[in-house]
Amino acid sequence: MTEERDLSPLARLVRSRTVAALGTLNAGAPFVSMVPFAVLPTGDAFVIHVSRLAMHTKDMREDPRVSLLVMQAEGEGVAPQALARVTILGEAREMEKGSEEERACREAYLARFPEAEPLTGFGDFSFFAIRPARARFVAGFAQAMSVTAETLAQALRARD
């Protein structure tokens, strides 16, 4: 069963990467963009900081269903089909400015991207928390597993 498997490779993958492919629905069609991300210390949400002018922000406001793909970097001597990757399916919610939730998202994001601090003062930027519903982790060729939101959060909270 997936719940009993060692998910430390999943946690290492997420911690080692700073950008994800964000999939949104744009007028009912898939739209993919790149976003820097952080993870809340509780492990139960991914945090992105995006401009209101961006297409993906408009998409998330209209339909909160999203997907994130975090993938091992190419060029590490690994065949493309064997690259580790995780696809997270969840819902994105814009954080209310000045709220406790926004403060927690800001702290997590700036801990990972301190150079982004000036952008947090721009009025057209907002923090979104993406709460996973489930994930699909591929550790390499023929090593795929489904992961519940709870198991994902537990893996991301643990330190290896």
Image (spheres, helix red, strand yellow):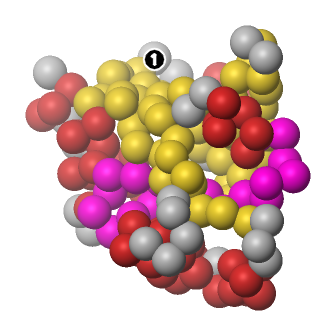
Q: Which residue is drawn at the image coordinates 16% and 32% (left, top)?
A: 3
Quarter-wise, where is residue 26 in the image?
top right
Kindly state the secondary structure of the residue where label 1 is placed: loop
Q: Which quarter of the rendering shows the C terminus? A: bottom left
Front position in the image: 91 or 23: 91
Q: Which residue is drawn at the image coordinates 72% and 52% (left, top)?
A: 35
Q: Position of 27 compared to 41: left or right?
A: right
Tell me where the magenta segment starts and ends, as one range: 39-56
Front position in the image: 111 or 143: 111
Residue 137 position within the rendered picture, expressed as x and y whole percent measured from the top left: 43, 31
Residue 50 is a magenta residue: yes
Question: Would residue 33 be visible to someone looking at this image?
Answer: yes
Front position in the image: 13 or 124: 124
Residue 73 position within the rendered picture, expressed as x and y whole percent measured from the top left: 70, 49
Q: Position of 155 compared to 115: left or right?
A: left
Quarter-wise, where is residue 132 in the image?
top left
Residue 20 position within the rendered picture, expressed as x and y whole percent measured from the top left: 66, 47
Q: How many marks?
A: 1
Q: Position of 40 compared to 61: left or right?
A: left
Q: How packed is label 1: few (under 14 Cα within 10 Å), some, or many (20 or more)?
A: few
Residue 28 is a magenta residue: no
- Amino acid under label 1? Ala
Q: Which residue is drawn at the image coordinates 21% and 40% (left, top)?
A: 150
Q: Position of 99 compared to 19: left or right?
A: left
Question: Would residue 13 be visible to someone looking at this image?
Answer: no
Q: Which residue is drawn at the image coordinates 14% and 21% (left, top)?
A: 1
Q: Which residue is mark 1?
A: 142
